[in-house]
Image (tube, helix red, strand yellow):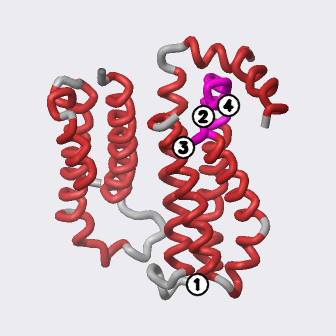
């Protein structure tokens, strides 16, 4: 990890990072959009997972539901990643030493990798496994994210 | 959310009482409730007339927009409250 420190320092001292850090309202406003997108990302993930588990919408075919929710899922993910990056630049060096942040990034990269590789394949025949992994991974990202502020 | 929210509130009730954002959040929660009740007592009761239409009647759409805006406001007020406590 030590080799990544210069990148964190560069983000922290970048124009973007300093501007957000020195503004009294930019961080809260960006975080709010991060949270709005979070409700949509976890909401769509939850609905799709409950459908795969057979708990919700039993009469609606999964592919149909997945097609309707895909734009919401992907756009909210895009908003989460971009606002998350902005928040990160404003306190990158603080994040570097934060175990919760490291856990969150590991979980996030695992969740993203899973979402775009295994997940689409698993939904065909291993729906319950896909749902379980998806729920655990994404909700853990959220939990670790909350811990950044509380635990350090 | 109500149960956990009540517990969180309990742990810092006085601070919350003095926070403008907490008060705004409670007002918004009440508004969200009023919006839902009004929707259920009016246009929802006539759902069989419009459930198969491509575009729901204006009153239903208004209830939908209000719901989205008010709940987003609840998040905004709640998050801002945490920044302004202490």
Q: Residue at x 64, y 63 (%)?
A: A70
Task: Residue at the far right: name it.
Answer: A3
Distance of mark 2 from mark 4, alpha carbons? 6 Å
Residue A140, position as x, y percentages in the image: 55, 56
Q: Residues within 10 Å of mark 4 (few under 14, many from 20)?
A: some
Q: Residues within 10 Å of mark 2 (few under 14, many from 20)?
A: some
Is disc 2 in contact with disc 4, using a CB cutoff of under 8 Å? yes
Q: Nearer the viewer, mark 3 or mark 1?
A: 3
Quadrant of residue A99 within the rendered picture: top right
Distance of mark 1 from mark 2, alpha carbons? 43 Å
Is disc 1 in contact with disc 2, using a CB cutoff of under 8 Å? no
Which chain letter goes with mark 2? A
Q: Residue at x 76, y 77 (%)?
A: A121
For numbered disc 3, what is the local secondary structure? helix
User: Disc 3 marks which residue?
Assistant: A145
User: Disc 2 marks which residue?
Assistant: A98
Q: Nearer the viewer, mark 1 or mark 4?
A: 4
Residue B29, position as x, y percentages in the image: 24, 45
Task: Residue at the far top: name it.
Answer: A22
Which chain letter goes with mark 1? A
User: Do the residues at discs 1 and 4 belong to one chain?
Assistant: yes
Residue B45 vs A38, above or below: the answer is: below
Whichever of callouts 1 and 4 sits on the residue coming sooner in the sequence is 1
Residue A1 vs A56, above or below: the answer is: above
User: Do the residues at discs 3 and 1 belong to one chain?
Assistant: yes
Distance of mark 3 from mark 4, alpha carbons? 14 Å
User: Disc 4 marks which residue?
Assistant: A96
Q: Residues within 10 Å of mark 1 (few under 14, many from 20)?
A: few
């Amino acid at each position: 990890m030590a080799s990544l420190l210069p990148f964190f320092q560069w983000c922290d001292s970048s124009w973007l990072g300093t501007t957000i850090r020195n503004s009294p309202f930019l961080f809260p406003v960006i975080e709010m959009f991060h949270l709005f997108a979070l409700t949509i990302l976890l909401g769509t993930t939850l609905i799709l997972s409950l459908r795969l588990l057979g708990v919700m919408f039993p009469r609606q075919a999964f592919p149909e539901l997945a097609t309707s929710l895909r734009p919401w899922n992907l756009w909210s993910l895009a908003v989460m990643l971009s606002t998350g990056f902005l928040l990160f630049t404003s306190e990158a060096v603080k994040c570097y030493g934060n175990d919760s942040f490291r856990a969150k990034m590991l979980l996030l990269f695992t969740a993203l990798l899973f979402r775009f590789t295994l997940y689409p394949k698993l939904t065909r025949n291993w729906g319950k496994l896909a749902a379980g992994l998806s729920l655990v991974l994404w909700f853990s990202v959220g939990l670790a994210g909350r811990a950044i502020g509380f635990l350090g | 959310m109500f149960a956990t929210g009540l517990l969180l509130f309990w742990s810092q009730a006085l601070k919350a009482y003095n926070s403008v954002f907490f008060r705004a959040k409670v007002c918004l929660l009440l508004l969200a409730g009023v919006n839902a009740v009004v929707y259920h007592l009016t246009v929802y009761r006539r759902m069989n007339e419009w459930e198969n239409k491509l575009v729901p009647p204006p009153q239903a759409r208004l209830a939908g927009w209000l719901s989205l805006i008010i709940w987003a406001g609840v998040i905004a007020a709640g998050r801002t409250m945490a920044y302004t406590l202490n």
